[in-house]
Amino acid sequence: MISERKNNIRVFRSVEEMNNTLANLLAEIAEKSVRENGRFLLCLSGGNTPKSFYKLLSANQYRDIIPWNKTFVFWVDERCVPMNYESNNAHMASEYLFKKIDIPAANIFPIKVNLTPSGAAENYEQMLKDFFGKNQPVFDIILLGLGENGHTASLFPDTPVLFEKSHWVKEVFVEELQMYRITMTAPIINKARNIFILITGKEKSGILRTVFTVPDKPQKYPVQLIKPENGEIIWFADSKAASKLLNIHPEA
């Protein structure tokens, strides 16, 4: 898997270049998905990295060319904090993106964290089943990040949710954060047609090198669980995040 990961990374000189490339790719996939299937299914995560990307998507050139009226948005994970908190993933996306574009409110499916953690997970799994019917969800794009401890979505090291196979969505208590989170499980994430992992900043350089160079230890580095069944995975990194990777150079 190490060589495969290296073949699937794109390194950029700046976050701006990375975001522009990603936005263009997202627009292409959205147009193709609507043309072929009548809708575009997008699944988001949180953290600081996507903020500038959301701002770019709300700018004129993308606000007008992405078929937002046929775009349906879900979340791969959520913090169990009130829905109006800045740290709530859906709130952040709303503030930086949805309030600035013309997307129907009925097309947005946040995780209801006003319920208990287990209730929120059960509710979201049922919401997915209601939307997708009998089939497991297959998203056109899932956007993920990478934590300094190797987590992605809310799949944290040494947590029981890592190898969950019976549920699509599950609650997890993250000991190091003293917080409950809700997360899609790895088998559901891996159904996606395209998985894009965004990594920026020098503080991520160590963990990025680790997950690219050590044998798979997904219990310790959960991002190594992300292996799409029939789709494509691309790692998008700025040059600071990729600075400790050998033989990889920024795109011109």
Image: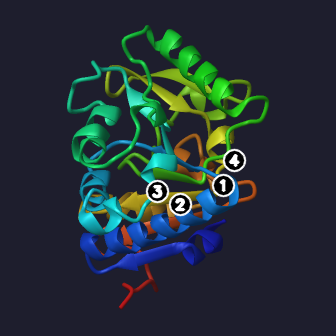
Is 61 situated left or right of 112 in this image?
left
Specify the quadrant of the image occupied by residue 6.
Answer: bottom right
Q: Tag 1's secondary structure? A: loop
Q: Tag 3's secondary structure? A: loop
Proximity of marks 3 and 1: CB atoms separated by less than 8 Å: no
The tag earlier along the polypeptide, 4 or 3, is: 3
State which mark lies toward you, 4 or 3: 3
State which mark lies toward you, 1 or 4: 4
Q: Position of residue 56 (x, y in %)?
A: 27, 62
The tag earlier along the polypeptide, 1 or 2, is: 2
Residue at the image point whose x is 38% and y is 44% from the top: 103
**The C terminus lies in which quarter of the figure?**
bottom left
Proximity of marks 3 and 2: CB atoms separated by less than 8 Å: yes
Q: According to the image, label 2 marks what residue?
A: 30
Q: According to the image, label 4 marks what residue?
A: 191
Q: How far apart are the two marked residues, 4 and 2, measured between alpha carbons?
A: 17 Å
Q: According to the image, label 1 marks what residue?
A: 227
The tag earlier along the polypeptide, 3 or 2, is: 2
Is 148 situated left or right of 172 in this image?
left
Q: According to the image, label 3 marks what residue?
A: 67
**The N terminus lies in which quarter of the figure?**
bottom right
Q: Position of residue 97 (x, y in %)?
A: 28, 47
Q: Position of residue 225 (x, y in %)?
A: 62, 48
Residue at the image point whose x is 30% and y is 62% from the top: 200
Q: How far apart are the two marked residues, 3 and 2, measured between alpha carbons?
A: 7 Å
Residues packed near mark 2 inside 10 Å, few (<14), some (14 to 19) or many (20 plus): many
Residue at the image point whose x is 29% and y is 20% from the top: 81
